[in-house]
Amino acid sequence: MMACLALCTVVHAQKKKPAKATGYTMYPPLGTWDEKEMRTGADRLSEFLPLLKNKKLAVFANHTSLVGTQNLVDTLHKLGMKISVVFGPEHGFRGTADAGEKISNYKDEKTGIPVVSLYGAKRRPSKEDLKDVDIMLFDIQDVGTRFYTYISSLEEYMIAAFENHKPLIILDRPNPNGFYVDGPVLDTAFRSFVGMQPVPIVYGMTIGEYAQMIAGEKWLKINGSSTYNIRVYKYGVENPEFMDLKKTVPYRMQIIACEKYTHNSKYVLPVKPSPNLPDIQSIYAYPSTCFFEGTVLSEGRGTPMPFRIFGHPSLPST
């Protein structure tokens, strides 16, 4: 039998019923939204597009990598940018694979661009993958939970960029669980792909902020060493050094931040971030109820309310 989970801190803490909105809306459990209009890093494409012209690109993306309503890769392809390879995370580049499903490399039907899966046995781009690449881009929607594997994919991608002396551009996106920090910090003796760094379960940062933290704390192992200096370039300032393809600066990263974003910004997610997070209630419950995956209980995968219900045939019906 299945039992509904009471999301007291999420649903019942609302002081007033939120206004209806089209799309996939996030509502903070406590407080009110910052109503300033904001833009994601990808939505600022026209501003950073000059960095990409006449360069060979690698793009780590999936179905959440949107510029307006169109996929970032499709947009860059239509604009004539030279994309050498697309890398896809868990669930694949187009977001159609189930959790944990093995994904093979293939050519994208829509663009003809080679797609390399970085989920499964291979989690980091190889030197061969990057031999025809000048700049690496990363743009994926995260949900701010340590065991959501996209931040682990980000870390592996960062290491590949730095070890191969490629400039890395991260397009930032809001964190739907970015208004709080909660849960125990990971004991790194139990490090795995569902938990690589000593952060709480809910870490309250955008994916761009997380990238800056793990670089600044020197938690990365670059060529097996934590002794390095990663230069984080401020976007909007002329930095010819960042685009120096002669590789005189080996470790460099630029974050295209969300414009006018705060950790209480109102934002409508245009698509669900993964197959079993279909709505904001599931995203809010996910950091807690995902732990049922380590038990005999079902956490509601395959139902209309994943992570919002749990159950087992032995549970009473009332």
Image (cartoon, rainbow, N blue to C red):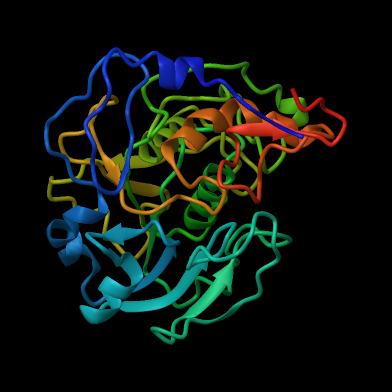
Nearer-the-camera pick, 126 or 67: 67
The answer to whether residue 235 is seen in the rendering is: yes
Left or right of 126? Residue 111 is left
Residue 245 on image: x %, y %: 32, 65
Residue, x 57% and y 72% (percent of image)? 116
In the figure, residue 298 lies in which quadrant? top right
Residue, x 45% and y 78% (percent of image)? 132
Residue 158 on image: x %, y %: 49, 50
Tell me: residue 99, above or below residue 210.
Answer: below
Residue 28 on image: x %, y %: 33, 23
Left or right of 296? Residue 208 is left
Nearer-the-camera pick, 316 or 61: 316
Tell me: residue 181, above or below residue 2.
Answer: above
| Quarter of the image where the N terminus is located | top right
Left or right of 235? Residue 59 is right
Tell me: residue 5, above or below residue 209.
Answer: above
Left or right of 288? Residue 179 is left
Residue 224 on image: x %, y %: 66, 44
Nearer-the-camera pick, 57 or 14: 14
Q: Residue furthest right?
A: 314
The answer to whether residue 55 is seen in the rendering is: no
Residue, x 25% and y 38% (percent of image)? 267
Q: Residue furthest front?
A: 318
| Quarter of the image where the C terminus is located | top right
Residue, x 25% and y 41% (percent of image)? 257
Nearer-the-camera pick, 88 or 99: 99
Tell me: residue 10, above or below residue 101.
Answer: above
Query: How many badges with numbers are in the image?
Result: 0
